[in-house]
């Protein structure tokens, strides 16, 4: 195949990849249409039952798992007393996956099940499409209620982003550093006393973040947990006592709830029982009418199921009934049965539930049209094999034919069926788009295979390795446990690939007695680089335990972050910066031959502020790691201005890269690549977790050994080997840095480096660079290694004469494209085939999100465009 | 890893010749009947290996060792005594076959091969297992027992037929040896161990997924498959 044809085909394949990704995503994460506008009361024969409350205090404690309030080891002594005496009704509110704050707040306020798209939007919160300004919610209803209510909000600024302009008074806090246990909560508490005296609001919302931070930092049983619970209990007491004392709070309802729970590691995002079981408590002296109190503390029925288990969305119609506003339009919740007893008249109870069911039927009929919703007496088939839509129609019909005595039961039956049908994922895919997306990816795969495997460098065992790697990866995508624990695949295949390179090197360096060629100079034995590379690989894979099953189990990171080892960790990190500065000064010296002190000075110019930033960031983010410096030093470091410092480092790195690029000598661009690599390492060190920093020293050593192993390979065959090496070592690095295919694996800690306001693009880039730091580094050095394939000067000319020259870049890009297109197609097919699978939301949807990031962000931007850039610099 | 002998790169012509097939008669019969026999012995102790890997593997060790020694003495040509000439192994066998009382050097060579494999072989293979991801802070007896079984399966016959000649072992490591039942079995053990790691992360929650049950099983199955394939592809050189 002509190299130009290959270039055209590969370009085409790389245009088809993003098309396939986006088309499939549009079918897999459909934009859920919501009914616009505000609900109004249905005009029914009977009047709307009178509300029992006129205002609500809504207190969210982030990550408040059910057992924190209801269990034996709890700090909520006052709340537990309220539950025992009947002024509080306890529930466990099931939070659907993804258990992260924004979708959960959406469920708690609109009653709808947020689409998976909200997960992405959770990371790009300022996006207006995620705003609920135009959606019906209990906040919008209260605001519009009785000619205009007032809402006040204190705490997590997620609420301010979701409901822009809705609050009369508000003070948002952003969860910047999870090490902040007190400041975020004090910022809420300082408003409580004043707002409880005010009588101008009809909703007072608090969202406390400290407990969630403690969970992330020290787990559900950390030493700060019980004191924090007691602090939250104190707020409950303060509000409850005000409700007893203040006349304007006489008819107030107080709701205490968590937005999600946490797992045993203190994290959340997935669907473990601990993550999906937040507590929910309704508090008011009036509730004594319907409750004689429950046993508390108590033991869970199973896992974290305390008392009655309801859906989180059920809060919405319950508030609607209790406060007397119409149920929000997109609600999928059901009025909690326990509260019906507050209305002594049976007609009122049926009315409340009927209005709830009518609202649900509006959603049902949009998805499953049936004549019964217009005319309940319409004749429809209700026997035999029914689809879920037909079943709902029949249940709706039976609510109208039921005698008054069993009307409530029939309404509940319909509502529950509607809730489960409409919340299930199955009804939402667009099969056409899914198939089109797969077709585009498959086409990209076909074209890239034709373009790549037509090169003779692929008609070798290397080509077999690439094919085997892609096929095994594709097969693995269908096993949910291997998707969750994907790191094992990469650790396993990387080890084998290193051994494969070692054997190949050994063969090419083994002198053959039968060949009578004149003795060549003896090649160095591959044993040392082979063993070094394997040992480094073993060390890298042990750095962090990732995945699902063993996340957080003993690893080098857990060892180093133990307080006793904190000085050692700091020493490792500082050494990494020294190592990088040394690489920078050495490469500057060999390239531009400046005076040594000047080289060192320019190497230290970005390194010292970068290290200072790291120290200051750690002093804020994980002060316990610097405790050995003494409290004064930590306080001093924590006080450094982070944003200007980060901007300064970024500017210095950019300036130095620019100067180096401009001053490079014509035709000898490859010389400056080591300089650029050191600058890139410093940039990646800014964005990655502190504990990952020493990995870059291991990566550098690995690359040296890899180069030694690859030294006999030349030309296009070397390009293939480097392409595969970049794939396996890059993926290994990604997992070794703690990433995984779970949503909770995303590291957001460096998202705001150098960013003061909210800027989607900047934050997105910073998050991506932080999470993909390892693969970005490997992608760079592999192209750097590619440029060495021709050697320099006369060596290069000799090889050109040997005819081994040509097509390295095309073959290299072809290897990357074949794997990316193949992996993408496999993930898409797996997601389509398994779309009814139990794990689709918890395993395969996150995996597809990651496949999108790998395909669009990593492959296209870093691998292809970045690779081309490095190549051009090296050749220029 | 590709082991197809048909890829187009020019294979380095091997400086070594494959082992001859065992002589028709008792030797060939034993060579054919042996893998099913050893596999059945392994299968019989499989449940106890799952229950307590390290002790059960240690209990099985003498049996495998005895059978491997017996197999080497009966079916394999004696170590080529550091000779590298192409014709020599076959000639040596011819010479030795003519005499009936050569079982003493055979037995002593086999025992030396056993000692070398169990000491040096186990150590090298245990380190290799760790480099490829075996636990290092826990399960040390299990890993050592696993390495010992690998050393018996792959190492004893290799040392028995190739001795301790550095050049031959370099060819063994570089996959430059021509295929025969001994070399095939050794390559099979390594590939079997590598493939045996696949089921461990699956969420089936079975007892046998624990370290190193699948690994040892992979070693035994890979050994049997490699031995058979080694006979079938006799004389071919792996292309990598
Ligand atoms: Zn939260
Ligand atoms: Zn959290």
Image (cartoon, rainbow, N blue to C red):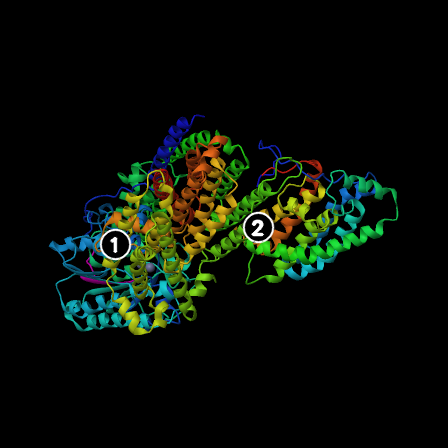
Visible residue check, residue A263: yes
| Disc 1, SS | helix
Visible residue check, residue A299: no
Residue B167 image point, x, y percent: 67, 46
Q: Nearer the viewer, residue A810 or A67?
A: A810
Residue A505 image point, x, y percent: 56, 43
Q: Residue drawn at (58%, 46%), measured in percent from left and top? A: B195
Q: Residue drawn at (67%, 57%), measured in percent from left and top? A: B120
The residue singled out by tag 1 in the image is: A109
Residue A808 image point, x, y percent: 44, 35
Please state which of the two labelled residues, at mark 2 or mark 1, is closer to the viewer. Answer: 2
Q: Nearer the viewer, residue A7 or B166?
A: B166
The residue singled out by tag 2 in the image is: A527
B77 within the magenta span: no
Asked whether, in this view, residue A220 is left or right of residue B236, the answer is left
Asked whether, in this view, residue A58 is left or right of residue B71, the answer is left
Return the disc, 2 or 1, that comes first in the chain's sequence. 1
Residue range highlighted in magenta: A49-61
| Dot 1 beta carbon under 8 Å from ligand 1 | no
Please tell me if label 2 and label 1 are on a single chain: yes
| Disc 2, SS | helix
- Crowdedness of circle 2 by 10 Å Cα count: few (<14), some, many (20+)? some
Q: Residue drawn at (47%, 36%), measured in percent from left and top? A: A715
Q: Is residue A170 above or below residue A413?
A: below
């Amino acid at each position: 195949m002509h190299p130009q044809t290959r270039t055209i085909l590969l370009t085409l394949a790389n245009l088809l990849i993003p098309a396939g990704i986006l088309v499939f995503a549009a079918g897999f994460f459909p934009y859920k249409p919501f009914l616009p506008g505000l609900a109004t009361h249905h005009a029914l024969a009977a009047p709307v039952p009178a509300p029992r409350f006129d205002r609500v205090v809504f207190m969210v404690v982030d990550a408040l798992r059910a057992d924190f309030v209801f269990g034996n080891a709890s700090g909520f002594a006052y709340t537990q007393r309220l539950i025992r005496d009947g002024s509080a009704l306890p529930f466990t509110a099931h939070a659907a996956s993804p258990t992260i704050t924004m979708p959960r707040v959406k469920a708690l306020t609109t009653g709808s099940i947020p689409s998976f798209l909200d997960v992405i939007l959770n990371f790009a919160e300022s996006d207006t499409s995620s705003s609920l300004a135009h959606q019906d919610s209990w906040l919008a209803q209260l605001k519009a209620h009785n000619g205009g209510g007032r809402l006040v909000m204190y705490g997590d600024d997620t609420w301010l982003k979701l409901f822009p302009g809705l609050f009369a008074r508000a003070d948002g806090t952003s969860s910047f550093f999870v090490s902040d246990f007190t400041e975020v909560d004090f910022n809420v508490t300082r408003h409580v006393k004043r707002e409880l005296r005010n009588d101008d609001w009809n909703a007072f919302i608090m969202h406390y973040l400290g407990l969630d931070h403690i969970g992330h930092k020290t787990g559900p049983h950390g030493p700060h947990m019980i004191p924090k619970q007691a602090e939250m209990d104190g707020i409950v007491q303060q509000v409850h006592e005000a409700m007893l004392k203040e006349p304007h709070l006489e008819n107030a309802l107080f709701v205490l709830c968590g937005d999600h729970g946490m797992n045993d590691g203190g994290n959340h995002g997935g669907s473990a029982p601990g993550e999906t079981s937040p507590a929910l408590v309704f508090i008011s002296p009036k509730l004594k009418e319907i409750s004689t109190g429950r046993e508390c503390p108590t033991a869970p029925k199973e896992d974290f199921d305390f008392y009655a288990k309801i859906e989180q969305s059920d809060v919405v119609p319950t508030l609607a009934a209790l406060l007397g506003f119409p149920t929000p339009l997109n609600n999928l919740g059901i009025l909690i049965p326990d509260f019906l007893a507050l209305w002594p008249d049976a007609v009122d109870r049926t009315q409340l539930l009927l209005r709830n069911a009518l609202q649900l039927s509006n959603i049902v009929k949009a998805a499953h049209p049936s004549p019964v919703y217009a005319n309940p007496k319409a004749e429809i088939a209700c026997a035999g094999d029914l689809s879920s839509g037909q079943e709902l129609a029949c249940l709706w019909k039976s609510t109208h034919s039921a005698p008054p005595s069993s009307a409530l039961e029939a309404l509940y039956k319909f509502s529950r069926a509607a809730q489960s049908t409409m919340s299930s994922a199955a009804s939402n895919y667009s099969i056409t788009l899914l198939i089109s997306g797969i077709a585009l990816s498959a086409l990209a795969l076909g074209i890239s295979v034709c373009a790549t495997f037509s090169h003779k460098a692929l008609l070798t065992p290397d080509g077999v390795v690439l094919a085997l790697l892609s096929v095994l990866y594709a097969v693995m995508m269908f096993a949910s446990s291997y998707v969750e624990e994907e790191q094992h695949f990469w650790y396993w295949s990387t080890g084998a690939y290193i051994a494969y390179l070692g054997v190949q090197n050994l063969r090419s360096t083994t002198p053959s007695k039968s060949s009578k060629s004149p003795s060549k100079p003896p090649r160095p034995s591959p044993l040392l680089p082979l063993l070094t590379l394997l040992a480094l690989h073993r060390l890298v894979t042990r750095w962090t335990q990732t995945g699902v099953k063993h996340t957080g189990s003993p690893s080098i990171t857990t060892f180093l972050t133990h307080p006793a080892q904190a000085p050692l960790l700091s020493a490792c990190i500082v050494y990494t910066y020294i190592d990088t500065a040394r690489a920078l000064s050495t490469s500057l010296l060999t390239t531009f031959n400046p005076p040594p002190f000047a080289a060192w000075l320019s190497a230290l110019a970005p390194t010292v502020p970068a290290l200072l930033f790291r120290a200051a960031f750690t002093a804020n983010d994980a002060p316990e790691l610097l405790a050995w410096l003494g409290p004064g030093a930590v306080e001093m470091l924590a006080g450094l201005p982070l944003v200007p410092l980060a901007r300064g480092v970024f500017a210095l790195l950019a300036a130095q890269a620019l100067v180096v690029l401009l001053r490079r000598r014509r035709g000898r661009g490859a010389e400056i690549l080591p300089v650029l690599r050191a600058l890139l390492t410093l940039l990646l060190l800014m964005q990655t977790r502190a504990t990952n920093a020493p990995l870059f020293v291991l990566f550098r050593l690995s690359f040296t050994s890899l180069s030694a192993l690859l030294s006999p390979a030349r030309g296009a065959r070397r390009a293939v080997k480097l392409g595969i090496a970049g794939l396996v070592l890059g993926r290994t690095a990604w997992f070794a840095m703690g990433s995984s295919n779970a949503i909770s694996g995303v590291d957001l800690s460096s998202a705001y480096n150098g960013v003061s306001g909210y800027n989607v693009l900047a934050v997105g880039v910073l998050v991506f660079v932080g999470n993909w730091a390892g693969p970005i580094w490997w992608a760079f050095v592999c192209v750097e290694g590619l440029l060495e394939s021709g050697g320099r000067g006369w060596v290069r000319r000799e090889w050109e004469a040997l005819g081994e020259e040509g097509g390295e870049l095309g073959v290299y890009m072809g290897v990357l494209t074949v794997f990316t297109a193949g992996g993408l197609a496999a993930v898409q097919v797996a997601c389509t085939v398994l779309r009814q699978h139990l794990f689709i939301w918890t395993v395969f949807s996150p995996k597809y999100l990651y496949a999108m990031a790998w395909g669009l962000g990593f492959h296209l931007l870093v691998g292809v465009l970045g690779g081309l850039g490095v190549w051009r610099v090296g050749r220029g | 890893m590709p082991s197809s002998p048909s890829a187009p790169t020019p294979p380095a012509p091997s400086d070594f010749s494959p082992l001859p097939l065992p002589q028709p008669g008792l030797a060939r019969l034993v060579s054919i009947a042996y893998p099913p026999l050893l596999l059945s012995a392994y299968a019989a102790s499989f449940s106890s290996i799952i229950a307590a890997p390290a002790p059960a593997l240690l209990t099985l060790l003498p049996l495998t060792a005895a059978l491997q020694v017996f197999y080497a003495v009966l079916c394999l040509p004696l170590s080529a005594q550091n000779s590298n000439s192409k014709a020599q192994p076959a000639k040596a066998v011819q010479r030795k076959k003519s005499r009936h009382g050569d079982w003493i050097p055979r037995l002593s060579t086999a025992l030396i091969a056993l000692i070398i494999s169990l000491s040096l072989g186990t150590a090298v293979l245990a380190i290799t297992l760790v480099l490829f991801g075996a636990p290092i802070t826990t399960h040390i007896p299990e890993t050592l027992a696993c390495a010992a079984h690998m050393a018996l399966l792959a190492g004893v016959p290799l040392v028995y037929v190739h001795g301790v000649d550095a050049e031959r072992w370099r060819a063994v490591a570089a996959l430059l040896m021509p295929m025969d039942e001994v070399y095939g079995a050794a390559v099979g053990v390594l590939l079997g161990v590598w493939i045996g790691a696949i089921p461990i992360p699956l969420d089936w929650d079975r007892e046998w997924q624990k370290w190193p049950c699948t690994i040892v099983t992979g070693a035994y199955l890979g050994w049997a498959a490699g031995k058979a394939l080694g006979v079938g592809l006799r004389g071919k050189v792996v292309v990598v």
